[in-house]
């Protein structure tokens, strides 16, 4: 089965689908030198004909319209939302599809996955820091989700931070880990060893899409 990975980034989702058993091709409008499979640089507007040659389509449209700081009411308006446009195109293709995004996106009947469901995280300072990193997946045909397993302190990986949300720094926010350690910590916590900081801070753990991909293959093979 061939899967087309739209808005692919550096390939966090792609590696999960590959582990599940798909042949994966990535598409992005920006160069992605770290992408681990076949890559095509192409704009979203030009992918419809390409998508017809694939069995399953995954899309991770930009999330900034839903994830910008809630304390800056104008920040979200500065970003374009492609979610509804992407869904409309994928529905017209009449192929199985997955749309991944952050909580707050206009998903329909989405499942939520969390790093704690897969035991993701890393040991920092005096103990284990779990990776939560909630993401929504609108999957057609529908698949089963997996409940969160929140237990303790967390590590946040986003923007320019790898942050311990339980320890507080002088600004009252979570304590940042030292720059020299943060990429190694992030790679361990996410289960990703090939990305730089910019790439991994925007990625999703491969465990999420491996979980979804295995269910989809079972469905498609009957």
Image (cartoon, grey):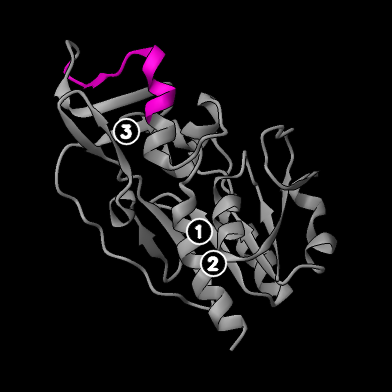
Which residue position is annotated with label 2? Answer: 213
Which residue position is annotated with label 1? Answer: 209
At horizontal 80% and vertical 69% (from top left) the residue drawn is: 52
In this picture, which residue range is highlighted in magenta? Answer: 172-185
Describe the element under mark 3 as helix, strand or loop. Answer: strand
Going from N to C along the chain, the mark reached first, 3 or 2, is 3
**In the image as oriented, which residue stretches furthest toward the bottom?**
222
Can residue 96 be seen by looking at this rendering? yes
Describe the element under mark 1 as helix, strand or loop. Answer: helix
Residue 156 - label: 3
User: Residue 153, position in %: x, y?
Assistant: 17, 37
Asked if labels 2 and 1 touch by Cβ distance under 8 angstroms, the answer is yes
Q: Is residue 203 above or below residue 84?
A: above
Disc 3 crowd, CA 10 A, few/some/many (<14, 14-19, 20+)? many
Image quarter where the C terminus lies is: bottom right
Going from N to C along the chain, the mark reached first, 3 or 1, is 3
Between 76 and 129, the one lying in front of the other is: 129
Label 1 and label 2: CA atoms lie apart by: 6 Å
User: Residue 125, position in %: x, y?
Assistant: 19, 23
Indicate yes or no whether the magenta region holds residue 23.
Answer: no
Residue 90 - label: none
């Amino acid at each position: 089965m061939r899967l087309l990975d739209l808005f692919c980034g550096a390939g966090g989702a792609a590696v999960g689908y590959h582990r599940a058993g798909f042949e994966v091709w990535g598409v992005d409008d920006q160069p992605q030198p770290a992408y681990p499979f076949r890559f095509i640089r192409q704009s979203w507007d030009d992918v419809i004909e390409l998508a017809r040659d694939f069995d399953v389509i995954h899309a991770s449209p930009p999330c900034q319209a839903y994830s910008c700081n809630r304390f800056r009411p104008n920040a979200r308006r500065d970003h374009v939302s492609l979610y509804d446009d992407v869904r409309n195109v994928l529905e017209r293709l009449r192929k199985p599809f997955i749309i991944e995004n952050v909580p707050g996106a206009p998903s329909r009947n989405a499942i939520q996955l969390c790093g704690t469901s897969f035991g993701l995280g890393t040991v920092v300072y005096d103990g284990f820091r779990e990776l939560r990193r909630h993401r929504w997946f609108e999957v057609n045909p529908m698949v089963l989700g997996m409940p969160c397993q929140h237990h303790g302190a967390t590590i946040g990986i986003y923007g320019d931070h790898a942050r311990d949300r339980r320890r507080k720094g002088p600004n009252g926010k979570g304590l940042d880990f030292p720059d020299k350690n943060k990429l190694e910590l992030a790679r361990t916590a996410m289960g990703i060893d090939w990305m730089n900081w910019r790439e991994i801070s925007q990625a999703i753990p491969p465990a999420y899409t491996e979980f979804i991909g295995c269910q989809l293959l079972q469905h498609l093979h009957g």
